[in-house]
Image (spheres, rainbow, N blue to C red):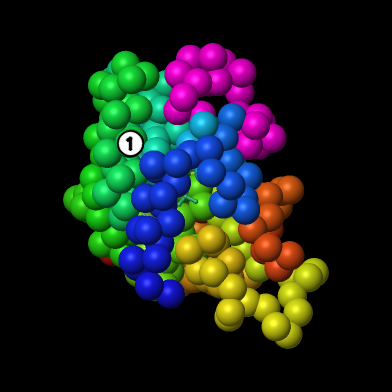
Amino acid sequence: MNRYSIIDLYTDFATNPGKDFGWDKGMQNALNHHYKGAWINSIPEVIWSYCAAVGNPFSAGELHAGETVLDIGCGAGVDLCVAALLVGEKGKVLGLDVTPAMVEKSRQHATLAGLSNITVYQGDDEKLPVEDSCVDVVISNGAINLSLYKEAVFAEIYRVLKNNGRLFFCDMIKDENNISTSCCEDESWADCIAGTLTSSELIKIMGEAGFDDVQMLATNHYKTSAYTVGATFRALKLRGGL
Ligand SMILES: C[S@@+](CC[C@H](N)C(=O)[O-])C[C@H]1O[C@@H](n2cnc3c(N)ncnc32)[C@H](O)[C@@H]1O
């Protein structure tokens, strides 16, 4: 895996949202993941064309008015906009993406949607640009599997969450019913195939990072290869800081 191939792929997507990359995206993808009609109607249509969601992290639990939310690997900002609607004007939504073109696109989309409580950072999820214990909810959608050091990502998420903070995320996992011996080393990392783990491997890493009540809630229809499937997870930070 190389960071540049990830940045190249997602720069291409940020520039050409209509191009066929071999995975579902766009408004139909959001509808397939049951994003609510109220959100679809409130967020400008062009933003939905960049929806590369592998699931619906908002199905894992509620966001409350006034909360602070961080979206890791926010892409062009679809989930940032949904989170901003949910937390309202008194809430705060932070986004992080490693691809500069996505950061620019998500900032443009926040402005286009008229959502002034969104701030987007460019950077790597292995080192979050946020202070300890200041986020109520971390969300992520199709991004953590792209990281080489998932232990570092979950340790960082744990660090930035407040006590009683929640983690709601969707990601590609290895489909344990369909792993062949040829899976997956030769497959593309940037397309969310080679970097995927099994659900039990992910749950173990989250537990070791300190999370409680770690659950895989469901798998879904989303596929990036014959060996991978979309899944939704939830975890809580019940103990104090690190
Ligand atoms: C499949 S897209 C999903 C985008 C968005 N969450 C959505 O649902 O439309 C994955 C995103 O993760 C970003 N990404 C990949 N590796 C990352 C890393 N190490 N740190 C932060 N962002 C990363 C990519 O640039 C890309 O925008």
**Label 1 CA crowd tier, 10 Å (few <14, some 14–19, many 20+):** many
Q: Does dot 1 land on a helix, a strand or a loop?
A: helix
| Left or right of residue 162: residue 224 | right
Magenta residue span: 28-48
- Farthest bottom residue? 181
User: Does the magenta stretch mainly form a helix, a strand or a loop?
Assistant: helix
Quadrant containing the C terminus is bottom left
In terms of image quadrants, where is residue 115?
top left
Instruction: Looking at the picture, tell me which residue is in the foreground, 123 or 202.
Output: 123
Residue 71 shows in this picture? no
- Farthest right residue? 177
User: What percent of the width, then of the height, locates residue 34?
Assistant: 66, 31
Q: Residue at x 63, y 77 (%)?
A: 184
The kind of residue tagged 1 is: Lys
Magenta run includes residue 85: no
Q: Residue at x 39, y 65 (%)?
A: 5
Q: Residue at x 51, y 29 (%)?
A: 48
Residue 7 shows in this picture? yes
User: What percent of the width, then of the height, locates residue 218?
Assistant: 70, 50
Vertical relation: 241 (above or below) 167: below
Vertical relation: 65 (above or below) 129: above
| Left or right of residue 193: residue 45 | left
Does the numbered disc 1 mark a residue whose Cβ is under 8 Å from ligand 1? no
Q: Residue at x 43, y 56 (%)?
A: 9
Magenta run includes residue 38: yes
Report which residue position mark 1 lands on.
105
